[in-house]
Amino acid sequence: MSPFDLTGKTAIVTGANTGLGQAIATALATAGADIAAVGRTPPVDTRFAVEALGRRFHDISADLSTMEPISRIVSETVDHFGGIDILVNNAGIIRRNDAALFTEDDWDAVMDVNLKTTFFLTQAVGRRMMEQGRGGKIINIASMLSYQGGVRVPSYAASKSGLAGVTRALANEWAGKGINVNAIAPGYFSTNNTEALRSDEIRSRDILARIPAGRWGRPDDIGGAAVFLASAASDYVHGTLVPVDGGWLAR
Ligand code: NAD
């Protein structure tokens, strides 16, 4: 059997209705996993793609800006699929403004979704994985701004740098329990998240000029790293960030 095979595994993917989350859900399903998709709107296209691959799909309607849905996400997934093997914390938002003008709302909104709910959902899923006693795989979607400060996105940089720290902190506690906690750090991908950047001619040109691969990432570029970190192939990989960035960090 391939070490990348995910047949019989259940993966929770947050924010799976668009962009990177949709591509990750589809890649995990291609490798054999069933998908519990968590988000605010029905992920119609993702359901279609996953079911077309012959995998099971369950849609959990939840707003991750508060901790309210966390226990339901775990119980619905377990009721539907019998357990949880993989969690992909992909849902995230960004707010742009000069640091001198940045509002408390733009700070809290980003930190709540990208860091607070992500941590407590991971805590709840991690507890379940420990009860199950068969290990598990947790994949956080970090960013280049887990390494760098970015431009006019202070709460986003704080949240993604914090997520890198949480990834390492949880790996330290859970590696010995057979739970792998790692992150993927995407470079610049063409999704809703980067729409404002791509429509700013100067920023868009400057970003492209720094990417050795010579193009922005396409959502499909992320799937391989997700399957690796979700599978037995990464069983001895703990607490690390895997950049998928077209070479951005090598520059
Ligand atoms: P996107 O905006 O298409 O996807 C974000 C997803 O998060 C959507 O499905 C959205 O519905 C969901 N989401 C946001 N707030 C939510 C909430 N309160 N409750 C439930 N779901 C919520 O953009 P994307 O680029 O696909 O972003 C996915 C992840 O990748 C994010 O964490 C983002 O920060 C990260 N990322 C993206 C890039 C990039 O270049 N696109 C680079 C680095 C990191």
Image (spheres, rainbow, N blue to C red):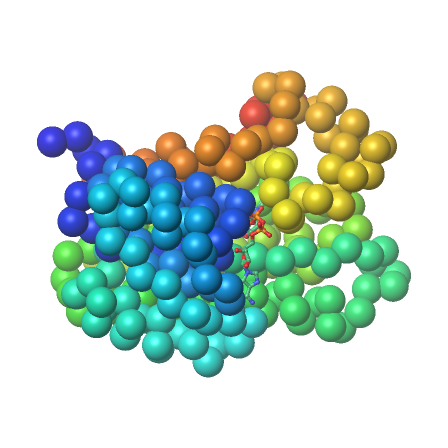
Q: Is residue 211 above or below residue 153?
A: above
Q: Is residue 76 above or below residue 138?
A: below
Looking at the picture, tell me which residue is in the foreground, 6 or 22. 22
Q: Quadrant of residue 97?
A: bottom right
State the residue at coordinates (88%, 61%).
100
The reply, left or right, for residue 66 in relation to residue 152 is left
The reply, left or right, for residue 163 in relation to residue 234 is right
State the residue at coordinates (50%, 64%).
41
The reply, left or right, for residue 151 in relation to residue 108 is right
- Residue lying farthest right? 100
Residue 172 at least partly seen: no
Looking at the picture, tell me which residue is in the foreground, 140 or 197. 197
Residue 239 in picture, x, y percent from top left: 39, 47
Residue 144 at least partly seen: yes
Q: Quadrant of the N terminus?
A: top left
State the residue at coordinates (15%, 57%).
134
State the residue at coordinates (41%, 49%).
46
Residue 18 in picture, x, y percent from top left: 52, 49
Q: Quadrant of residue 147?
A: top right
